């Protein structure tokens, strides 16, 4: 079977699994008392599913990087067999990632957060790290969207 067919079937399986888990989460019921609130019964299922999806994402990233490295061994130095300058792309990617993380850390706030019970959460490190994750997620989403638009527009095609 060709790689794109395997990818297609894995994609369909993941979509079906996602629909089933979200269907369980939103559709089964809310008979799960959590303090004075009533949480969905399959909250734990959704959390485990998110961990599994994160593990699949990390595994796919590592395998993709290994595959790209192996494919680049057959071409001229600095350019893989598809003609893409992989060293330059890697350097630019790392610079963008580090820049986004540093910028997110600088913008992150350590201001204490009022909790629903009236107390304050004041661990400055955790507050800054949570802000870093949120800001870097937004920035990386914007960079990925911009890269997709540039790629689809054909501006940088030879």
Image: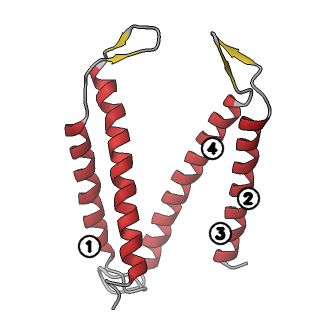
Give neighbour class at mark 2: few <14, some 14-19, many 20+ (Cα, 10 Å): few
From the image, tell me which residue sits under label 3: 7
Question: Which of the labelled discs sits on residue 88, or is there none?
Answer: 1
- Where disc 2 sits, the SS reads helix
- Where disc 3 sits, the SS reads helix
- Marks 2 and 4, how far apart at CA: 14 Å
Q: Of callouts 1 and 2, which one flags the residue occurring earlier in the amino acid sequence?
A: 2
Question: Which of the labelled discs sits on residue 119, or is there none?
Answer: none
- Marks 1 and 4, how far apart at CA: 32 Å
Q: Are marks 2 and 4 in contact (CB under 8 Å)?
A: no
Q: Nearer the viewer, residue 78 or 45?
A: 45
- Marks 3 and 1, how far apart at CA: 27 Å
From the image, tell me which residue sits under label 2: 13
Task: Give the vertical position of 135 relative to 130 (above or below).
Answer: below
Q: Residue at x 72, y 37 (%)?
A: 26
Give neighbour class at mark 3: few <14, some 14-19, many 20+ (Cα, 10 Å): few
- Where disc 4 sits, the SS reads helix
- Where disc 1 sits, the SS reads helix
Question: Which of the labelled discs sits on residue 52, or is there none?
Answer: 4
Which residue is outermost to the left? 106
């Amino acid at each position: 079977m060709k790689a794109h067919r395997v990818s297609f079937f894995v994609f369909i399986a993941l979509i079906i699994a996602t629909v089933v888990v979200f269907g369980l989460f939103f559709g089964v019921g809310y008979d799960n008392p959590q303090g004075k609130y009533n949480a969905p019964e399959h909250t734990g299922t959704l959390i485990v599913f998110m961990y599994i999806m994160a593990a699949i994402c990390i595994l796919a990233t590592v395998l993709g990087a290994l595959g790209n490295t192996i494919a680049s061994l057959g071409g001229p130095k600095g350019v893989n067999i598809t003609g893409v300058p992989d060293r330059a792309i890697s350097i630019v990617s790392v610079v963008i990632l580090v820049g986004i993380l540093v910028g997110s850390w600088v913008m992150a706030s350590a201001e204490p957060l009022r909790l629903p019970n009236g107390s304050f959460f004041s661990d400055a490190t955790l507050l800054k790290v949570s802000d870093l994750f949120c800001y870097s997620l937004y920035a990386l989403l914007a960079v990925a969207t911009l890269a997709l638009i540039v790629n689809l527009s054909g501006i940088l095609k030879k």
